[in-house]
Image (spheres, rainbow, N blue to C red):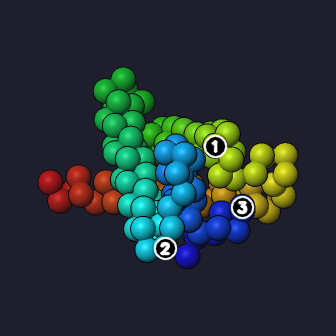
Amino acid sequence: MEIEPSGAQPTELGARAVEHLLHRRIEGRDRKVVGELTHWSYGIAWGALGIALRRLTRRVGLGGPGWPLAAHVALLLSSELVALPALGILPPLHRWGRIQLATFALNDALYALGAELAYEALERRG
């Protein structure tokens, strides 16, 4: 189970993001469903970006899994560290402790690594 710096689970953060964007409160079972859909959609979208980065870095001759993985982590982390606090979903970065920030960064790095390894395995299968 993932826990974000606010102490909330990712599905709760997804529900908060949708509430913020729609200016509408989501309650009960709908909150859990919206949170799950948002969380999974977000993850799939970032996974697709990882594939695009891998193809782009190959096309420009950077090759190897290191470049797309580093770019994927950098984009994912910088997006979340800017967007989520700006939406009021997470506290501003200056309120985070070092452990919270490191945990958040490690979570994103592991996600990007998992996506990269999955893509490599699928690519080998052909």
Q: CA separation, marks 1 and 3?
A: 15 Å
Image spot of residue 56 (x, y percent): 35, 30
Indicate which disc, 3 or 2, sits on the residue closer to the N terminus. Answer: 3
Q: Is residue 103 visible?
A: no
The front one of 64 and 15 is: 15
Q: Decide: few, some or many residues near mark 2? Use Cα within 10 Å; few <14, some 14-19, many ≥20.
A: few
Which residue is tagged 3? 5
Instruction: Decide if residue 23 is on the left or right side of residue 55.
Output: right
The residue type indicated by label 3 comes to Pro
Indicate which disc, 2 or 1, sits on the residue closer to the N terminus. Answer: 2
Which residue is tagged 2? 28
Q: Is residue 107 visible?
A: yes
The label number, if any, that marks residue 87 in the structure image: 1
The residue under the point 39% across, 31% down is 57
The residue type indicated by label 2 comes to Gly
Indicate which disc, 1 or 3, sits on the residue closer to the N terminus. Answer: 3
Closer to the eye: label 1 or 3: 1
